[in-house]
Image (cartoon, coloured by chain):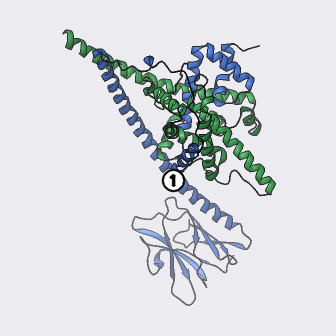
Amino acid sequence: MKFRGFYAFSPGLTFFNFFRIKEQQTLELLLARDQKGLRDLYADYGQAVYGVISRIVKQDGLAEEVLQQTMLKAWNGIGSYDPDKSALFTWLAAIARNTAIDAVRLKRYQNQQKTDSFDPHVHDSGTHYDEAAALDVQKLTKNLDEKYRFVLDKAYLEGYSQAEIADEFNLPLGTVKTRLRKAIAILRDQLRSEKSLFIGILTTLAALVGAIYFFSTFG
Amino acid sequence: MARSISEIRDEGLLERYALGDLGLHERSEVEAALAADADLRTELREIEVALYRYAQAHRRPAPDAVLDRVLADASKSPLAAVKRPARDRSTTTSSGGNSRIGTWLLAAASLGALFFGFYQLNERQNDRTAYVAQLSDCDELAKQRQVLLAKVDEYEQLGRPGTRVVSVAATEKYPETEIVLHTNNATQTNFLQLQNLPALTDAQSFQLWSLKSDSDPIPLDVFETEDGRVFLKVDHVDNTNAYAITIEQRGGAESPNLADLIGVFDLSAG
């Protein structure tokens, strides 16, 4: 079975498939029911997944519960993960998103039954950036217009479907689809630029080293 | 009828697939296309990486306590290992084994990674500088906002019921100066509006005085102006009969210099 693998945060390193190998190792540990796999999964993707969950549930306590459920679902359901169909993070993020949305719906229903008020916006727990994350966001979004970033945040970080975005924010569905594709295309372009830069540096150095080797051997 | 590869691309189904926003039928179509087309798989990979980076940029520190609970729960429900066909590892790495060329290439790759790392670090530093500057701008804007809100509050007080407007002529020495007092006995607030004030030297300031019938003049605000106009809130002083404005030495004085009296305005007037 081919293993698609997954690329690193720094696109330059993807050239060596370091993280593709890392993801494969994590998967094999999980399949072998080795808890190191679970630790590695949490270490590699826990923060990103927690960020997504926090934006959907908007309550720290509930976000932690959902994160716990997500990781357990991944552990228990790893047999159903098909690396040909998606990267491990994509699969994990989908579990997280669905679990978070279900948790919000359940909480809302339970509170309606108790006639307690539940305001999912009581505490915005999704915006506690540290400086490093703030810089990452700034770097990634500098070429991203606000209108594209808005739909991308709603769809990817907050679990809205395109139809829900169109409905709730009074946008034509076609506009939502177009902006989402454009947002992702911009992020991909950025990735390609960084990759090209790295490859350029590497090629130059490889040529230099190759020349040194040639002259030292045959010169 | 199943969509073609180009239809799947053009309709944005790859992006929606990566976002998990497809129904069962469309998902099956995309998966069938992915199984058949390597370029499509590469494209999906790029989309997934781009989205992962976006999620990673919006990360939150994951609590260690959650991991502890997950591990504890995982221990309670041990499952048999899941069998998968072994992957052909011969295609995974590019380390080159015992080849000298491979060693040189690995060295080149390591240097490349180092250079790229330095480049990224430099970019990061530039981003950090810009970020700090933006934070400083935000702080500055917040301060300006507070100042403006205070001004708005002052202007709103001018319109409160009971506010009297007292317009006073300046002294003969400064006939151009206009003095208007907005005074409200109920709220005990006074605002002084001055225009065409005379130019000062660097050693001078304007000073406001509270005049009472049974005491010496009480020094109040000391101020300067660049455009000859001032709007300021005047502290309420009990039993003040009138206010006076004079020109004093820079920083103010203990008693008024009547030779440079700009105006006196009686609170009982108007």
**Colour applied to chain A:** green
Label 1: how many residues lie within 10 Å, few (<14), some (14-19) or many (20+)?
Answer: few
Q: Is residue A5 visible?
A: yes
Q: Residue furthest top?
A: A218
Q: Position of residue A5 (x, y in %)?
A: 52, 25
Q: Residue furthest left?
A: A219
Of A100 and B132, nearer the camera is: A100
Point out the image quarter for the C terminus of chain B.
bottom right
Q: Is residue A146 visible?
A: no
Q: Position of residue B12 (x, y in %)?
A: 67, 23
Q: Position of residue A131 (x, y in %)?
A: 47, 46
User: What element does badge 1 sit on?
Assistant: helix
Of A80 and A96, nearer the camera is: A80
Task: Determine the image quadrant of residue B25.
Answer: top right
Q: Which residue is mark 1?
A: B139
Question: Taking B70 as reference, is B109 left or right?
Answer: left
Q: Is residue A118 above or below residue A155?
A: below
Instruction: Name the residue at 72% across, 53% down.
Output: A119
**Colour applied to chain B:** blue
Of A194 and A110, nearer the camera is: A110
Instruction: Name the residue at 62% across, 17% down.
Output: B34
Q: Position of residue A218 (x, y in %)?
A: 20, 9
Instruction: Name the residue at 54% across, 45% down.
Output: B71
User: Which kind of residue does numbered mark 1 sit on?
Assistant: Asp
Instruction: Name the residue at 34% across, 17% down.
Output: B96
Task: Determine the image quadrant of residue B33.
Answer: top right
